[in-house]
């Protein structure tokens, strides 16, 4: 038998070598992959240990906040148009000066309540600007949204409310809110958690941003009802008690300390004050609201001239807008009466507590269902509660209730109030306190906890406790 041709032998040999080469290549690739995997385990394990070690030592762990760089039409431009326009937007330029604190006070009597000591003519609805400026000094800001534990939206919702509230239609009132929410939902930060890690400050009451829930269909905006607004958490001066993502924070007071020492000095001052009045009331009557008990309180105060003092706050009076007169009266009083006004809560309650005056509440929504990050759970430790139904029906003497409290109990309550003062203040945003935690610090800590707990959950559904309020639509920008 003749041998195969040479070219056929070469082809056969080549066909045998090719599978061997393929096997060798596959084995080498496998070994390389295996060794690479082992190397990765070692490196990643060490890196993970380093990261864990670094994170555990990081003082900002769990506290990083990313601040959206909003177009100026959502904040700075709103304040820039602070001049009075066509009797709709009050002249707010004085109130938004000095980082939102307003004009410095000049105490004509004892030079205590002055700008040099941290006292300003702060407007009760100026929190949007104050909080934003304070956030700029926050120690755990980050420019990398991916590592942020929460995202802050510096929209001036409260100022936006007032500039279009009177004399405009609802479409105009909602225009900035619609613009904002559409802008936010287009950002990559929104997609990470569907907005559930976002929060904003709206320095008014919750009802001012829930027009659909109000008795008055023309009151306020729908910021917290519309898509993009209802997913975010919001810090308010008064919660509507309708939405789980609403959290109440104190009204701004007139005192904005620049150092721990200023806080301590003020606490010592109010602790040593002689309280010559049993009770005090600062506020205007509400004759157009038959359910409001202010007229009954004013009548009881007038019937006890030796025990009760008040400031005349009738329409056109300037006394209720004189910080030095208000604070001087509160410092001389043991108890300060805090009935509902335009809404359930009052800025006056915080002014009085800062003065070391024990608040007397007449409705649970005025404090006990609000400010849970700030006020003791045991309400009797720092306040007195008298049912407004009893006052309305003339079944109770406020003076008699207060006189019946033992002096040693009064002293303990006052000391509790004085101890609460630091957490009820917003420090001057241009300075930094050292160890004192103010209202901003408490709010940030609280909101970080809520955002972290709800980031993986779908947006909470509204659960109505009281979908209407008798006060909405009765007030104004100025009265409280």
Image (cartoon, rainbow, N blue to C red):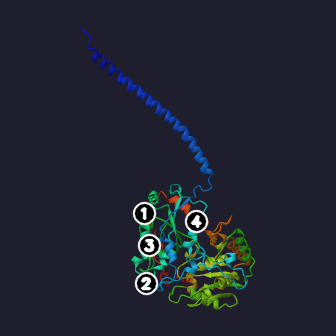
**Image height of 152 relative to 284, above or below:** above
Q: Are marks 4 and 2 in contact (CB under 8 Å)?
A: no
Q: Are marks 3 and 1 in contact (CB under 8 Å)?
A: no
Camera-nearest residue between 50 and 76:
76
Distance (Cα) linking label 4 and label 2: 35 Å
Earlier sequence position, callout 3 versus callout 2:
2
Determine whether the residue tagged by mark 2 lies in a helix, strand or loop.
Answer: loop
Residue on which the image places disc 3: 176
Earlier sequence position, callout 4 versus callout 1:
4
Q: Residue 5: x percent and y percent?
A: 26, 14
Q: Residue 79: x percent and y percent?
A: 52, 76
Distance (Cα) linking label 2 and label 1: 30 Å
Residue on which the image places disc 1: 185
Distance (Cα) linking label 3 and label 4: 23 Å
Earlier sequence position, callout 4 versus callout 2:
4
Residue on which the image places disc 4: 136
Residue on which the image places disc 2: 167
Task: Tell me what residue is drawn at x 53 percent, y 87 percent.
Answer: 286
Distance (Cα) linking label 3 and label 2: 16 Å
């Amino acid at each position: 038998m003749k041998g195969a041709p040479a070219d056929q032998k070469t082809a056969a040999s080549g066909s045998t070598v090719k599978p061997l080469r393929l096997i060798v290549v596959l084995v080498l690739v496998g070994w390389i992959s295996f060794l690479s995997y082992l190397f990765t385990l070692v490196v990643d394990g060490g890196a993970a240990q380093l990261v864990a070690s670094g994170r555990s030592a990081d003082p900002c762990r769990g506290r990083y906040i990313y601040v959206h760089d909003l177009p100026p039409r959502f904040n700075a431009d709103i304040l820039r148009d602070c001049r009075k326009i066509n009797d709709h937007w009050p002249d707010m330029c004085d109130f938004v000066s000095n980082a939102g604190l307003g004009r410095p006070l000049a105490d004509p009597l004892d030079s205590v309540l002055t700008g040099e000591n941290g006292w300003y003519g702060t407007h009760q609805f100026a929190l949007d600007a104050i909080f934003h400026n304070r956030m700029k000094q926050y120690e755990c800001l980050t420019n990398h949204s991916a590592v942020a534990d929460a995202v802050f939206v510096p929209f001036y919702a409260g100022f936006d409310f007032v500039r279009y509230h009177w004399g405009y239609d609802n479409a105009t009132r909602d225009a900035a809110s619609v613009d904002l929410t559409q802008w936010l939902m287009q950002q990559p930060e929104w997609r990470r958690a569907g907005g559930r890690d976002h929060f904003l400050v709206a320095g008014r009451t919750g009802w001012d941003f829930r027009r659909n829930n109000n008795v008055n269909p023309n009151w306020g905006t729908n910021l917290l009802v519309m898509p993009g607004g209802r997913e975010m958490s919001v810090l308010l001066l008064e919660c509507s008690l309708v939405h789980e993502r609403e959290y109440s924070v104190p009204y701004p007071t007139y005192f904005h300390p620049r150092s721990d020492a200023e806080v301590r000095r003020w606490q010592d001052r109010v602790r040593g004050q002689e309280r010559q009045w049993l009770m005090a009331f600062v506020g205007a009557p509400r004759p157009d609201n038959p359910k409001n008990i202010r007229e009954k309180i004013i009548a009881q105060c007038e019937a006890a001239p030796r025990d009760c003092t008040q400031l005349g706050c009738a329409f056109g009076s300037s006394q209720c807008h004189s910080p030095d007169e208000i604070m001087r009266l509160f410092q001389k009083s043991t108890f300060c009466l805090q009935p509902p006004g335009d809404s359930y809560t009052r800025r006056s309650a915080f002014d009085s507590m800062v003065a070391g005056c024990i608040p007397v509440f007449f409705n649970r929504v005025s404090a006990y269902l609000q400010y849970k990050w700030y006020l003791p759970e045991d309400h009797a430790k720092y306040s007195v509660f008298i049912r407004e139904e009893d006052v309305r029906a003339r079944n109770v003497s406020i003076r008699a209730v207060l006189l019946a409290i033992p002096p040693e109990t009064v002293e303990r309550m006052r000391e509790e109030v004085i101890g609460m003062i630091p957490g009820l203040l917003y420090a001057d945003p241009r300075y930094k306190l050292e160890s004192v935690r103010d209202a901003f610090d408490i709010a940030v800590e609280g909101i970080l906890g809520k955002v972290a707990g709800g980031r993986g959950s779908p947006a909470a559904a509204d659960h109505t406790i009281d979908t209407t309020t008798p006060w909405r639509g009765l007030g104004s920008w100025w009265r409280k």
